[in-house]
Image (spheres, helix red, strand yellow):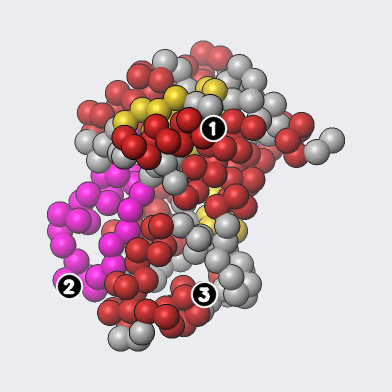
Amino acid sequence: MDAVAALDLSGRTALVTGAAGGIGLACAERLAVAGAKVVVADISAEGAHAAAERVGGTALVVDLSDPDQASALPHRVGGVDVLVNNAGLQHVAPLHEFPVETFALIVRLMLEAPFRLIRESLPHMYERGWGRIVNVSSAHGLRASEFKAAYVSAKHGLEGLSKVTALEGAPHGVTSNCVNPGYVRTPLVEKQIAGQAVAHGIPEDEVVAKVLLERSAVKRLIEPSEVAELVAYLCSPAAASVSGASLAMDGGWTAR
């Protein structure tokens, strides 16, 4: 049986945040192939509608850095069976220069919003006796790098949130896991190249090899579709006992 046939999400509703592009879009596409009714949530109205049209899903425009909007989102969906917490942003700066408001924004978007989305999604999952929560974390949820105080802090917090969710959700048929990719070929990664060049004092064309992939044994960027396949696996029958895990897809970065 091939992977597409093995995962049947017919009758399930999947909410993917930050799904207008990158990892989120790849996840939306993969879950749609599996038969899920996919809800594409993104701050970009144009991007959300384009992605929804591409996957045959529904677009919801939302600013997840607004706590009220985050809490309301699962209710706008009307019942979430699969929740993929993917929305995020990055800022690169030394700690002593890191803008306080930017730190608060990143933590609000990448830790508080997932908490609110999980909190409001669980009652429906508990009622149905089935649910899958996949938190798109990062190798930075397991390790740290210079100049990324907010991102590393938020991802480490997300790891803990995911594990608590796994423990509480287990009696109700709900699993919760983190996927931990290294550097993925996405706009988020591309946008930080300039900042990394300044922070490290090297030309932009040297950032990928000398900074991003320095600690990876596999010397290439990860494709979004690879992450989406791991997300899909965690929703499959074969992964029913995988919960509270952090699955590294980082080219060997965290093996060091």
- Left or right? Give the position of 54 relative to 157: right
Q: Can residue 161 be seen in this view?
A: no
Mark 1 lies on residue: 55
Question: Pointers 2 and 3 in contact (CB under 8 A)?
Answer: no
Count of numbered circles on the image: 3
Question: Pointers 2 and 1 in contact (CB under 8 A)?
Answer: no
Residue at 53% x, 57% y is 181
Which element is circle 3 on? loop
Q: Which of 70 and 31 is in front in this view?
A: 31
Residue at 50% x, 80% y is 209
Q: Disc 2 and disc 1: Cα gap in Å?
A: 43 Å
Q: Which residue lies furthest to the right in this view?
A: 1
Residue 63 lies, in percent from the top left, at 26, 36
Q: Which of 54 and 239 is in front in this view?
A: 54
- Crowding at mark 1 (Cα within 10 Å: few <14, some 14-19, many 20+): many
Residue at 41% x, 20% y is 77
- Left or right? Give the position of 9 relative to 131: right
Q: Disc 2 and disc 3: Cα gap in Å?
A: 25 Å
Q: Disc 1 and disc 3: Cα gap in Å?
A: 32 Å
Which element is circle 2 on? helix
Q: Which residue lies furthest to the top in this view?
A: 127
Mark 3 lies on residue: 213
Q: What stretch is highlighted in magenta?
A: 88-116
Residue 159 lies, in percent from the top left, at 45, 49
- Crowding at mark 2 (Cα within 10 Å: few <14, some 14-19, many 20+): few
Q: Is the magenta stretch mostly helix, strand or loop?
A: helix
Task: Choose mark 2 or mark 1, whichever is in front.
Answer: 1
In the picture, the disc for residue 96 is 2
Residue at 40% x, 28% y is 59
- Going from the N terminus, do you reach mark 1 or mark 3 first? 1
